[in-house]
Image (tube, rainbow, N blue to C red):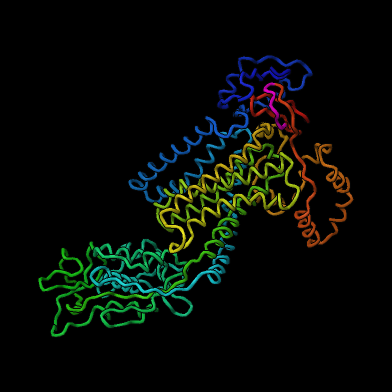
């Protein structure tokens, strides 16, 4: 039992440490309580400060994989399963909006909650919430930057292609042309960002009855480009083609099946042809009349064709082409039903393929590389870094565990907003895949950033800009970018499409392994009870960047102000010399212009002073393991729970 610590207890497993829950650690310590001797360090007052909330979760000594890790992984997986089942039930029986929201938002909160339980002594819950929210706010800036990056990438690294799509008329071609003509008639297309404006009807058919499949499963309508061309999203054309083929048990053309998924721009259909007739359909007027001109021509010798426009449940609203027995050619089970608006029949002997030209910009290897490593990897990881870097030198960040949770919170905030965006665009099914792939990957890279910042503040690493910034996001960018690059490669090149998900999952597992290896380096940093310090008024309360008004200024802080103020003896000689001249420099800085102060901040970022460190190596008297004890606040051994005395009592 450590002298003067009434809550310490003998460690019966000094090499492996003790694995307990926080509650279990408290229960085992309580029976051995004894009054502290007067005047001894670590007496009753210090003990009460350290134990006001809960005891730390103890860990084994430098063990890569242990029971607690397995338990947390099983908890996350089990809660994901429960969330999937519950969200699906709510989506089906209660409300699609509530179900989609639960499936989109729930996974991030589950991961944060599990890791907060692990580091609850080190983490201020409110600060984690603020960091989560700040990451979402920074996404507004990210969206502006991404808009320019995507435009540049599309203009300079993508490739323009014009492909021919052939579908037999009775095997999807007729329905494909009809669906496009119907959509062109039922939408007043305008600006890309404007919503569709449905017309009242199309020759007697109500446009409000337009099936969702004709919309390509999305609310995004075609839009008119700068030169008057009718531009359609690639997935819009793909889903219409697949719908037409499914309705007639036909086959989708290879241009749509193999090449269109790699489209990085909207698709233009310059022309369509059938039975020797070719039409220009690149503008809206041409596409509106395509069906009538290709399939609505009078049959020779027939004055009154018994075919009418009809809306049937098993096909899109269409011209029904009736055979001699009175049944429709498109679907032999559906008879023609008059709606008072007659149409002409196509010649019975005219058959063959319907040809449509598809013009679009397609992805290349260079396009995929820039999008994966810069647009997705670098910019998104930079957002997480910015959200966590702001609070790095705040006095309330007193433990590596807190930085891990804050990095995780920043990543989860971004992942949640992105998940909501993808759910709105692609439907609820995408949330199930992102629940087990994208969200864990984002959280993993966020923890890497938090751990590396912990190296700087609590291990004294990061003496150069290369180590401070680039190394902090280098590994997250590599893991994130490689994961995306494998999935973004053009389908027609290199990797088979079926192999890519397996490779992406392998990259994600590699990221988990690297994150755990980085984590082990800070396992010996002693635990500090931040909630107790906040209650005692020794560190600041949690706050958002708007309240503290330092959203940008805090990034340029290179020295720990708390350590300089309270423990100048532990600051490096370089830091001491600068600290000694701080007062003389302050008057000069006050007279400097804004540009001079800004340039000084940037030069400090590029050529920083030697960093300070809030911990020092020591030997735990109970478990005899080497630990890093906090030099400003009372802390606990992470292996056995021994309470080190307060080095700077108030």
Residue 318 as seen in the image, left or right of residue 258: left
At x 62%, y 54%, the residue is: 382
Residue 227, horizontal then vertical, whole percent = 47, 80
Would you place residue 183 above or below residue 5 in this image? below
Would you place residue 113 above or below residue 546 in this image? above
Residue 586, horizontal then vertical, whole percent = 85, 52
Q: Which residue sits furthest left?
A: 325
**Which one is in front, 527 or 646?**
527
Q: Can residue 429 be seen by looking at this rendering?
A: yes
Q: Give the range drawn in magenta.
A: 622-628
At x 52%, y 50%, the residue is: 415
Residue 67 as seen in the image, left or right of residue 217: right
At x 53%, y 37%, the residue is: 114
**Which one is in front, 400 or 276?**
276
At x 63%, y 36%, the residue is: 520
Residue 222, horizontal then vertical, whole percent = 40, 70
Q: Does the magenta stretch include residue 20?
A: no
């Amino acid at each position: 039992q450590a002298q003067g610590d009434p809550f310490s207890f003998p460690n019966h497993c000094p090499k492996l440490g003790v694995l307990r829950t926080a509650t279990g650690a408290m229960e085992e310590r309580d029976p051995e309580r004894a009054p502290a001797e007067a005047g001894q360090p670590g007496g009753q007052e210090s003990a009460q400060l350290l134990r006001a909330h809960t005891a730390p979760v103890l860990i084994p000594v430098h063990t890569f994989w242990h029971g607690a890790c397995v338990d947390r992984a099983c908890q996350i997986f089990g809660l994901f399963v429960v969330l999937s089942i519950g969200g699906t039930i709510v989506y089906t029986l209660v409300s699609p909006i509530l179900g989609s929201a639960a499936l989109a938002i729930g996974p991030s909160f589950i991961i944060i909650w599990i890791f907060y339980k692990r580091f609850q002594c080190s983490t201020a819950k409110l600060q984690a919430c603020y960091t989560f929210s700040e990451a979402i706010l920074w996404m507004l800036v990210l969206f502006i930057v991404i808009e320019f990056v995507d435009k540049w990438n599309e203009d300079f690294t993508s490739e323009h292609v014009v492909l021919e799509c052939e579908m037999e008329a009775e095997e999807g071609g007729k329905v494909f042309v009809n669906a496009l003509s119907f959509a062109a008639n039922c939408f007043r297309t305008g600006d890309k960002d404007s919503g569709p404006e449905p017309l009242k009807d199309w020759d007697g058919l109500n446009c409000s009855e337009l099936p969702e499949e004709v919309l390509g499963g999305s609310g995004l309508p075609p839009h008119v480009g700068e030169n008057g061309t009718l531009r359609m999203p690639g997935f819009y054309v793909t889903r219409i083609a697949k719908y037409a083929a499914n309705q007639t048990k036909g086959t989708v053309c290879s241009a749509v099946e193999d090449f269109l998924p790699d489209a990085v721009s909207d698709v233009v259909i310059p022309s369509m042809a059938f039975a020797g007739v070719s039409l220009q359909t690149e503008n809206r007027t041409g596409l509106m009349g395509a069906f009538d001109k290709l399939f609505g021509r009078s049959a020779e010798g027939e004055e009154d064709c018994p075919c009418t426009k009809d809306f049937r449940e098993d096909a899109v609203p269409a011209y029904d082409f009736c055979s001699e027995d009175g049944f429709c050619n498109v679907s032999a089970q559906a008879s023609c039903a008059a709606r008072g608006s007659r149409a002409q029949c196509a010649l019975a002997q005219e058959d063959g393929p319907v040809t449509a030209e598809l013009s679009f910009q397609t992805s290349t290897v260079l396009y995929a590389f820039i999008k994966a490593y810069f647009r997705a990897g670098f910019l998104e990881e930079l957002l997480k870094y910015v959200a966590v870097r702001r609070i790095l030198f705040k006095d309330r960040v007193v433990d590596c565990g807190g930085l891990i949770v804050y990095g995780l919170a920043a990543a989860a905030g971004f992942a949640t907003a992105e998940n909501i965006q993808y759910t709105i665009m692609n439907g609820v099914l995408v949330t199930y895949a992102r629940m087990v792939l994208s969200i864990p990957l984002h959280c993993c890279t966020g923890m890497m950033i938090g751990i590396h910042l912990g190296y700087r503040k609590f291990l004294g690493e990061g003496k150069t800009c290369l180590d401070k910034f680039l190394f902090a996001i280098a590994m997250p960018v590599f893991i994130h970018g490689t994961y995306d690059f494998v999935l973004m490669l053009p389908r027609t090149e290199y990797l088979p499409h079926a192999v890519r998900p397996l490779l992406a999952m392998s990259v994600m597992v590699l990221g988990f392994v690297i994150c755990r290896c980085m984590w082990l380096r800070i396992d010996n940093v002693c635990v500090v009870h931040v909630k107790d310090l906040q209650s005692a008024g020794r560190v600041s309360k949690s706050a958002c960047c708007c309240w503290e008004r330092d959203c940008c200024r805090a990034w340029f802080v290179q020295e720990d102000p708390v350590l300089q103020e309270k423990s100048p003896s532990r600051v490096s000689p370089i830091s001491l010399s600068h600290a000694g001249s701080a007062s003389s420099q302050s008057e000069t800085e006050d007279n400097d212009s804004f540009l001079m102060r800004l340039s000084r901040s940037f030069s400090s970022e590029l050529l920083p002073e030697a960093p300070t460190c809030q911990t020092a190596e020591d030997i735990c008297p109970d478990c005899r393991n080497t630990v890093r004890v906090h030099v400003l606040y009372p802390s606990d051994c992470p292996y056995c729970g021994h309470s080190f005395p307060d080095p700077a009592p108030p």
